[in-house]
Amino acid sequence: MIKIYGIKNCDTMKKAFAWCDSNGIRYEFHDYKKQGVPRERLVHWCRTLGWQTLMNTRGPTWRKLTPEQQAITTQGQAVALMMEHSSVIRRPVTENEAGMTLVGFDPTVFDSFVR
């Protein structure tokens, strides 16, 4: 079983769910919007992947932020921003049984990651 973090209405999330369903992959879904993301989890991801990898700078939430909010230079600033605006976290963030973490959805990469 894998754990998928994201936002239910996101198109990329829908693709990941559909892929899992059609490939018989069991998953647990954690909705950023409804459940938030525990600070410890964000810190772990930042340490493992780098905060720049987690930051969704292409979405509407990012574009609505002030230049001051966008001027992130440290992991602490990134974690604080992601906790306040969960939509700036890229999605999906997927954790597999081996404890590895993957950001984004590419069917080829996803296939080797979850099996």
Image (tube, helix red, strand yellow):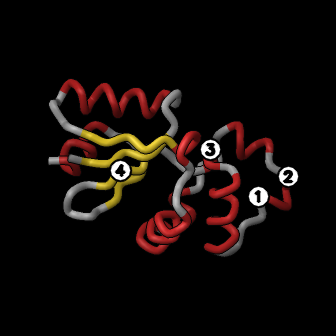
From mark 1 to mark 4, how far is it between C-alphas? 25 Å
The residue indicated by pointer 4 is: 94
Callout 3 crowding tier (Cα within 10 Å): few <14, some 14–19, many ≥20? many
Q: Identify which amino acid the numbered label 1 is placed on.
A: Gln
Disc nearer the start of the sequence (2/3): 2
Disc nearer the start of the sequence (2/4): 2
Q: Identify which amino acid the numbered label 3 is placed on.
A: Ser
Q: Residue at x 26, y 48 (%)?
A: 2
The residue indicated by pointer 3 is: 87
Q: Secondary structure at mark 4?
A: strand
Frontmost of labels 2 and 4 is: 4
From mark 2 to mark 3, how far is it between C-alphas? 15 Å
Circle on res. 66: 2
Left or right of 87, for residue 14: left
Frontmost of labels 2 and 3 is: 3
Callout 4 crowding tier (Cα within 10 Å): few <14, some 14–19, many ≥20? many
